[in-house]
């Protein structure tokens, strides 16, 4: 019955090559991806799709009825990225195939380089969804806005006004360095949650569910490229899906969390701290010191698996002040040049070439 079927929303992304440098994506890459997904839709392999980009990251937004971690859907995305990489190589785009870290596809793109945020749900009477896509940062960037949206009544009025939200939300948190995951229930375990997710380089919120009925509300890509590759290959440039309204935070409550351009790690060479600037689609071209980090938000109404949209959610002068503040914070942070805390601490740069630089100086340290 229409409106009762389960639908899966998969957002799968990769940097397959930048234009120019790490700024944006060449139109031929976008056309290639669209053509491949169009063919998949014609064959009935997917219900609907959209291709977007944030900075140099290619974002595949796909609806289907096969559930999360489906090998056919992941295989389709992997093929799109592989074909696009071929185009990127022909055009000698920058870092062609940057995020494809393995050669042979083995059923799931997780652990192979691309980032994935997925959720399966039963469509409600109306299903407004926001998809956030960031460039020049990592998955921990979503921790602060997710906390605000789902646990902070100063951000989300619905937590105190809407009886359906009163019981709060549960956050699943992954320890991307130590392994393992934990679920913490807010508001009861707010302090425990913050004790973890304030460490954005290690603990990442992966999903959020409503306590009253365990309904899925948000899903995030938590893949850390450097941990897969064992070296610096680029930032994770994560994606996030958030369902809105009718007992979940309103669209405007979710977007409100981005009026504060909080500091995230990424920016130049993935080794700096800078503000996350909310921008409209056409402004997602990080050129100042390869940044500052950007986030775009694509709004969709999902109707029987169809993706109505995208609506460019940050294309609103109400976000100008956040952008201005992000610009001022950029000036201030850049003033530090190569010094911390603008430059990330050494242990967060362990997969960069910094150890090689230090090695060159090794023999020159004399006992004082
Ligand atoms: P719902 O409770 O229907 O989501 O309405 C809330 C709202 O739209 C406030 O902006
Ligand atoms: P991306 O992770 O977006 O490719 O950026 C890499 C980089 O080094 C930017 O300076
Ligand atoms: Mg790149
Ligand atoms: Mg990128």
Image: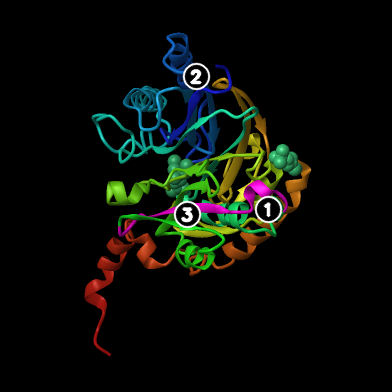
Residue bearing mark 3: 140
Q: Position of residue 284 (x, y in %)?
A: 60, 39
Q: CA distance from mark 1 to mark 2?
A: 36 Å
The residue shown at (48%, 32%) is: 58
The residue shown at (49%, 69%) is: 339
Q: Is residue 177 magenta?
A: yes
Task: Report the mark closest to the observer, 1 or 2.
Answer: 1
The residue shown at (46%, 59%) is: 200
In the image, 229 versus 20, the foreground residue is: 229
Residue bearing mark 1: 156
Q: CA distance from mark 2 to mark 3?
A: 29 Å
**Any mark on residue 60, and which?**
none
Residue bearing mark 2: 34
Task: Report the mark closest to the observer, 2 or 3.
Answer: 3
Q: Residues within 10 Å of mark 2 (few under 14, many from 20)?
A: some
In the image, 179 versus 33, the foreground residue is: 179
Q: Residues within 10 Å of mark 3 (few under 14, many from 20)?
A: many
Q: CA distance from mark 3 to mark 1?
A: 21 Å
In the image, 31 versus 41, the foreground residue is: 41
The numbered mark, 3 or 1, whose residue comes first in the sequence reads 3
Q: Secondary structure at mark 1?
A: loop
Residue numbers of the magenta segment: 161-178
Q: Position of residue 83 (x, y in %)?
A: 37, 22
């Amino acid at each position: 019955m229409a409106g009762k079927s389960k639908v899966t929303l998969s957002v799968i992304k990769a940097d397959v090559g930048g234009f120019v440098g790490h700024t944006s994506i060449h139109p031929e890459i976008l056309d290639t991806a669209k053509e491949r997904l169009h063919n998949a839709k014609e064959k009935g392999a997917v219900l609907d799709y959209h291709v977007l980009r944030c900075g140099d990251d290619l974002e595949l937004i796909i609806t289907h009825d096969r559930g999360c971690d489906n090998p056919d859907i992941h295989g389709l995305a992997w093929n799109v990225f592989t074909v696009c990489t071929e185009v990127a190589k022909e055009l000698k785009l920058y870092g062609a195939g940057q995020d494809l870290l393995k050669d042979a596809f083995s059923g799931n793109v997780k652990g192979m380089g691309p980032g994935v945020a997925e959720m399966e749900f039963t469509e409600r009477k109306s299903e407004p969804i926001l998809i956030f896509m960031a460039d020049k940062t990592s998955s921990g960037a979503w921790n602060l806005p997710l906390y605000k949206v789902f646990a902070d009544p100063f951000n989300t009025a619905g937590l105190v006004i809407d009886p359906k939200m009163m019981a709060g939300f549960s956050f699943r948190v992954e320890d991307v360095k130590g392994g393992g995951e934990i679920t913490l229930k807010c508001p009861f375990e707010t302090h425990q949650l913050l004790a973890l997710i304030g460490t954005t380089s290690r603990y990442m919120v992966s999903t959020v569910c409503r306590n009253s009925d365990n309904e899925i509300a948000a899903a995030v890509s938590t893949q850390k490229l450097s941990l897969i590759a064992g070296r610096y290959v680029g930032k994770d440039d994560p994606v996030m899906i958030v369902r809105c309204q009718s007992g979940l935070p309103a669209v405007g409550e979710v977007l409100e969390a981005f009026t504060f351009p909080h500091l995230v790690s990424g920016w130049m060479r993935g080794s700096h701290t800078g503000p996350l600037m909310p921008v409209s689609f056409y402004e997602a071209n990080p050129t100042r010191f390869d940044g500052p980090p950007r986030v775009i938000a694509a709004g969709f109404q999902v109707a029987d698996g169809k993706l109505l949209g995208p609506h460019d959610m940050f294309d609103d002068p109400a976000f100008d002040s956040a952008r201005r503040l992000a610009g001022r914070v950029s000036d201030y942070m850049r003033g530090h040049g190569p010094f911390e805390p603008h430059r990330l601490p050494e242990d967060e740069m362990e997969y960069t070439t910094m150890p090689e630089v230090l090695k060159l100086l090794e023999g020159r340290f004399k006992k004082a």
